[in-house]
Amino acid sequence: MPLHYEKVKVLEKKANQIRQDLIKMLEEAGAGHSAGPLGMADIFTAFYFHVLKHDPKNPMWPERDRLILSNGHIVPIRYVTLHHAGYDITKKELMTLRKIDSRIEGHPSYKLIPYLETSSGPLGEGLSQAAGMALSAKMDGKEHDWHIWCLMSDGEQEEGMTWEAAMLASKYRLSNLTGIIDRNNIQIDGFTEDVMPLEPLRDKYESFGWHVMEMNGHDMTEIVSTLEEAKAIQEKPVLIIANTIPGKGVDFMEYDYHWHGVPPGGGPEDDVKKKEQAKEALKQLRTLGGKIEHGE
Amino acid sequence: MKYYLADNYLDEKKVEWKKMRDGAGIGMAELGEKKKDMVVLGADTAGSARAKYFAKKFPERFVQVGVAEQNLTGVAAGLAYEGKVPYVVTYAAFLVGRAWEPIRTTMAYPENHAVYVSSHAGLATGSDGPTHQMTEDISIMSCLPGFTVIAPADYQQARDAVKAAYDLKGPVYIRNVREATPAFTTESTPYEVGKAQVLREGKDVTAIGHGFMVYWLLLIAEELKDELSIEVINLHTIKPLDKETILKSAKKTGHVFTAEDHNIVGGMGSMVADMLAQNYPVPMKLHGVMDEFAESGSFKDLAKKYKLDKEGTKKELKKFMKEWRKYVSLSVRN
């Protein structure tokens, strides 16, 4: 069922607020990744405010959907979204990213925050673990009780372990597993197709026995309908290629791989001086890129 | 402590030789009957690494991942996160060597409870050659925070260890070898993870071993009983180290000799030396694979050439004691 127009507006506004908090958080941390988290803000918002079966007050609810973040380096967007969704990460705590004694590590730590589901960071390991979780549910006859979602980057498709997992998920017909690739075409050393060509990505997963879908990762209606449809596919694991714009919402960060692994205040100065980067990014987000005069 | 070792175990010709990997495999199948949340994972070696006994009995709880050891660990971690107790089984070199970083990230760091059961550790792998003779596994698993590292002495102890590991917390590594080795412990021999076994008391030197080397040490102690009083310790749990038992023995004998089918760099001997250096330094000799790759050959021929047989080990032990007795007699300590 398509999303109601009003609900779309609510989700879009929420994604914008999340992006603003992300910028503030990264600036305060003085380290971390900008492009990927901004690019995935819409998908995270769709998950935590509409798609996921979850309960912020009972985060380890046994019947919750499992959201596995394989590319752990974009975890700041998850921390901010969790805060907005009502989990026990406070606004003050967001400002402790990457700092000593904080729970919100540079890459996710399961021991510190179990509802992150796994510890991650080293790339290419999430799909295997998600497959193990899907297998566990299937062994217990619970494959229809909750869904396992695995978010991956496009760059980590270069890891061999990803394809070992792709074979296994297909072998065991893990239809309770959906993989989502953040197809933003950049990785830390450059454009993916220069570093190591990934295309034809769709054909690769299809030939491994997966049902493949594509979506515009910034169109809330399309995100929600694609994720809902993925849950309905039987007999095969599902892979969604989410086409996104790295740095989405901040024009001087968009499409530029130099913004992969740096925070505002530490990025390239081609367009905006370092000390102005956070301020300018927030201004753009508040005014929706100059479309409105006064944002929130 | 009474250990109920096999009758006539000191008679080399009468002792039975059995495969540790069979002990581990049969132990897992036996455990599976009681523990319904136990899952076994194999990587195309269910036959040779002996996951087959469990797989045959409980096919619905056996996962065959194919020749893909990183995925083997990743899938096991997913199962562990969901509350299952995965037993991950294949050859040592691939099980923990190939997948070391995924093990670090998905098992050790989040403290997942999983049991890694290897076969083909050490030169006891035999003719497959150095690619398969894993002599660095204790080293690379012991340095991971939270890991329990076990090297059973024989068939029965491997069978006991896989069962005992179920009740531990966090990740566990159990080291087994391919070839048959002397089966000198029995079903009556007590087994407790983390508790070293003083199988023979002595006063001149402490000889510590794991795996089949323990058996050689027992024979050597008997053969040399008229010239040297050797205390023999079966250090089946390498991490956490049984500091108390080792210290007590070292204080009594003043000399420690370690013997293992593993690289001396980062092996059991290194860990014992590390502990003693900080608590009660005594003269030590680390006997084992001398930081080198071996070659193809039968277990018997390899053991002889690389001095891991009884005679080679005995020679090293005698040499060590001769040198230190000479030194001690000249020093102010005496």
Image: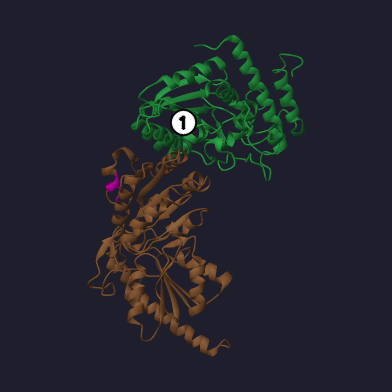
Chain colours: A green, B brown
The numbered mark 1 sits on a residue in which chain? Answer: A
**In this orientation, does residue B295 appear?**
no
Q: Residue furthest left?
A: B14
Residue A265, picture quadrant: top right
B221 vs A173, nearest the viewer: B221
| Residue B250, percent from left and from top | 50, 75
Q: Circle 1 — which element? A: loop
Q: Which residues are magenta?
A: B49-54
**In this orientation, does residue A263 appear?**
yes
Please name the residue that numbered disc 1 is placed on. Answer: A198
| Residue B270, percent from left and from top | 49, 66
Compared across the picture, whether A41 is left or right of B318 comes to right
- The type of residue carrying mark 1 is Leu
Bin the neighbour count of mark 1 within 10 Å (Cα to Cα): few under 14, some 14-19, many 20 and up.
some
| Residue B189, percent from left and from top | 34, 64
Q: Is residue B9 magenta?
A: no
Q: Which residue occupies 37% across, 70% down?
A: B2
Q: Which residue occupies 72% across, 25% down?
A: A282
B280 vs B36, nearest the viewer: B36
Judge whether B206 appears above or below B260 on screen.
Answer: below
Residue A250, picture quadrant: top right
Q: Residue furthest top?
A: A5
Quadrant where the N terminus of chain B is found in the figure: bottom left
